[in-house]
Image (spheres, grey):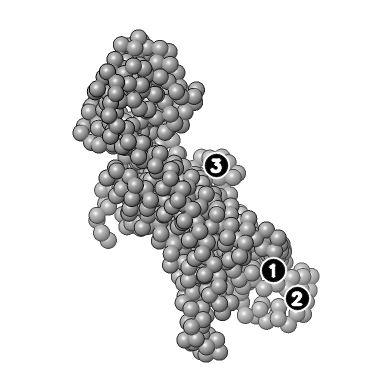
């Protein structure tokens, strides 16, 4: 095990409240996902400030630490620091119903994604060999390759039973054992024979095949978790090891074949009918919606609840048109938007972030480009969403679908080879090309405004009587409610002795740069920062009133004096709730300390602003 991330792992565990505050932890492709006993113990601002952490999200009842493509290496260092057997018990009613559902679906399906992806790529290679006549469908080689790939899908109920049991904290081996009953050759033979099956000549067992199914086992294990808890509570400990598994198998086997399995099978048939209806009457809708809204779904963690619909559709119909096409088009568009930013921006730090993020996004991992570039700058995100919808529309209208589950990157185009044709792969390539072309065009033209504006201002001759200053604008460094500086709760700022500006009652604790320029001052307590903008404005951002007395507690800085910063670059974070609890007003003042150098400093904001909205207009 590499020790490269040992320090980062220790810091993360400490700042999320310590090992006893972690009830569960696992990682996906870019994030470590923590379930915490008490979320208030986690210091989000401090975790975000760690070198090696891209961002932190609270979504679906999880505290998600975005790391990037090396998340597995970081998690390898985090896992030994946790003791999930001695954690504090989580308080009840911590999640609302919607969050609980998303968390349940995510915890059940996320762990099996690697197996599905691997099997999917084997299917893609097999389809490619068939299309180019390198193997024959009647050959033993084809049979064995198909076996390699189909094993995961046929025995999907067992995999789901295991992961769902882990999520619901019941015995995963018993859950897998119950799932194995559904796939036993004897039951398969009874279904094939078609003769009625009556248990003890009283309880009818519905004849249904459960290979590759999803919903039946999800229902069964959900009920099993309660049966197990009941048995563990009332069966004496001295005989628990023998009688709990025995009774569980008898009860759940009976319920599985008589009630829960048939109910899940029926639900699967209804879902299959819905998928078929959608494919025949509104094939464009899923690809357009996912293609356009996928970044938003990722931001809120909702993709974890929707992506499994593709797995369910594949288990029912043999292909996925719900999630796959829109997702891959969206990912390519996000990568393209980031690539255009890398080519257009003059900010070297942003250029590097956008360039590397675009490469990983083309491989299907979009969090770095989403949280590091597209979301902070906003215009690339808008362009990518429009492009994703345009490419998704083509994919939907041509009934494009994938034949196996896998990643959403360029290698995944092989998953669209099937039905002995390359047509679906050609269609998804065209859809991606349309989406990327629209995205690149929109991003380029929007960049003319958002990337070139400041450069143009710097190159223009100054016609005013004040040669040291030029006209320009500042954007809001943080979100919240805006007040005239005269209404500030701090009498010094309210007197305008330090200059014209505004006061903001913040709604969060992330302070971004309101302009492009250089950091000229940063108090050791990090509660105040000074920036000299490219247009000559000397900007002071003062966080809170009398917060100097906190001596830097609850504050983290991301820049130092002398650093070059771009618009929207993270400067400082602070824990607003902790500041308030300590008895301080978090009201933040944004003032132009060289106001006399300008003819006018005007407040052009609305009453409520979001980071990046227009805030102050400077007239030379």
- The answer to whether residue 53 is left or right of residue 104 is left
Mark 2: few/some/many CA within 10 Å (<14, 14-19, 20+): some
Q: Which residue is mark 3?
A: 95
Question: Nearest the camera: 599 or 589?
Answer: 599
- Distance, label 2 to label 3, CA atoms, is 42 Å
* Residue at point 43%, 67% (across, down): 411
Instruction: Tell me which numbered mark, 2 or 1, is placed earlier along the sequence.
Output: 2
Instruction: Tell me which numbered mark, 1 or 3, is placed earlier along the sequence.
Output: 3
Q: Which residue is mark 1?
A: 257
Q: Nearer the viewer, mark 2 or mark 3?
A: 3
Quarter of the rendering containing residue 221: bottom right
* Residue at point 40%, 29% (across, down): 476
Location of residue 290 in the rendering, given as x and y in whole percent from the top left corner: 56, 54
Residue 8 seen in the figure: yes
Question: Are the residues tagged 2 and 1 within 8 Å (C-beta)?
Answer: yes
- Secondary-structure class at tag 2: strand
- Identify whether 539 is placed above or below 3: above
Location of residue 299 in the rendering, given as x and y in whole percent from the top left corner: 48, 46
Q: Nearer the viewer, mark 1 or mark 3?
A: 3
Quarter of the rendering containing residue 555: top left
* Residue at point 46%, 56% (across, down): 436
**Number of numbered labels in the structure image:** 3
Residue 263 seen in the figure: no
Location of residue 372 in the rendering, given as x and y in whole percent from the top left corner: 37, 46
Mark 1: few/some/many CA within 10 Å (<14, 14-19, 20+): many
Q: Residue furthest bottom?
A: 139
Question: Nearest the camera: 227 or 569?
Answer: 569
Question: Nearest the camera: 508 or 503?
Answer: 503
Q: Residue furthest left?
A: 562
Q: Which residue is mark 2?
A: 197
Q: Quadrant of the N terminus?
A: bottom left
Question: Are the residues tagged 1 and 3 within 8 Å (C-beta)?
Answer: no
């Amino acid at each position: 095990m590499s020790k490269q991330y040992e320090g980062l792992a220790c810091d993360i565990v400490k700042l999320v409240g310590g090992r006893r505050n972690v009830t569960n932890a696992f990682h996906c492709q870019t994030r470590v996902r923590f379930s915490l006993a008490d979320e208030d113990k986690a210091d989000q601002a401090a975790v975000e400030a760690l070198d090696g952490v891209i961002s932190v999200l609270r979504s679906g009842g999880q505290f998600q630490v975005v790391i990037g493509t090396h998340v597995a290496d970081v998690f390898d260092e985090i896992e030994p620091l946790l003791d999930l057997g001695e954690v504090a018990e989580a308080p009840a009613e911590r999640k609302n119903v919607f969050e609980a559902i998303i968390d349940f679906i995510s915890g059940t399906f996320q762990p099996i994604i690697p197996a599905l992806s691997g099997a999917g790529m084997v299917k893609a290679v097999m389809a490619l060999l068939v299309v180019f006549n390198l193997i024959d469908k009647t050959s033993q080689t084809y049979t064995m390759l198909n076996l390699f790939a189909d094993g995961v899908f046929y025995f999907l109920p067992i995999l789901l039973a295991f992961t769902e049991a882990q999520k619901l904290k019941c015995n995963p081996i018993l859950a897998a054992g119950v799932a194995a009953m559904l796939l036993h050759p004897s039951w398969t033979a009874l279904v094939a024979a078609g003769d009625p099956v009556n248990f003890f000549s009283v309880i009818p067992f519905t004849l249904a095949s459960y290979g590759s199914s999803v919903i039946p086992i999800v229902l069964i294990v959900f009920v099993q978790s309660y049966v197990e808890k009941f048995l563990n509570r009332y069966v004496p400990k001295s005989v628990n090891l023998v009688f709990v598994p025995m009774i569980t198998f008898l009860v759940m086997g009976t319920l599985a074949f008589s009630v829960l399995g048939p109910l899940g099978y029926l639900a699967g048939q209804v879902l299959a009918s819905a998928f078929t209806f959608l494919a025949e009457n509104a094939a464009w809708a899923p690809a357009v919606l996912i293609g356009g809204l996928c970044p938003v779904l990722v931001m809120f963690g909702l993709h974890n609840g929707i992506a499994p619909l593709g797995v369910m559709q594949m288990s029912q119909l043999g292909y996925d048109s719900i999630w796959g096409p829109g997702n891959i088009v969206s990912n390519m568009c996000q990568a393209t938007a980031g690539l255009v930013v890398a080519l257009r921006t003059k900010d070297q730090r942003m250029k590097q972030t956008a360039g590397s993020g675009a490469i990983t996004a083309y491989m299907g991992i979009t969090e770095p480009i989403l949280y590091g570039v597209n979301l902070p700058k906003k215009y690339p995100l808008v362009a990518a969403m429009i492009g994703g919808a345009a490419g998704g529309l083509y994919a939907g209208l041509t009934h494009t679908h994938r034949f196996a589950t896998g990643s959403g990157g360029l290698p995944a185009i092989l998953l669209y080879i099937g039905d002995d044709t390359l047509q679906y792969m050609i269609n998804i390539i065209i859809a991606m090309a349309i989406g990327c072309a629209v995205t690149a065009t929109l991003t380029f033209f929007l960049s003319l405004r958002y990337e070139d504006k400041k450069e143009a201002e710097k190159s223009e001759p100054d016609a005013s009587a004040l040669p040291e200053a030029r006209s320009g604008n500042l954007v809001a460094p943080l979100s919240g409610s805006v007040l005239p500086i005269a209404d500030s709760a701090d009498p010094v700022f309210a007197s305008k002795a330090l200059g014209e500006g505004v006061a903001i009652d913040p709604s969060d604790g992330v302070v971004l740069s309101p302009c492009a320029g250089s950091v000229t001052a940063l108090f050791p307590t990090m509660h105040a920062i000074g920036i000299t903008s490219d247009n000559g404005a000397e900007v002071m951002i003062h966080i809170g009133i009398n917060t100097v007395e906190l001596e830097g507690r609850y504050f983290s800085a991301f820049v130092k004096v002398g650093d070059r910063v771009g618009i929207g670059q993270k400067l400082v974070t602070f824990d607003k709730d902790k500041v308030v609890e300590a008895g301080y007003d978090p009201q933040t003042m944004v003032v132009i300390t060289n106001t006399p150098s300008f003819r006018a400093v005007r407040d052009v904001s609305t009453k409520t602003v979001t980071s990046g909205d227009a805030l102050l207009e400077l007239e030379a």
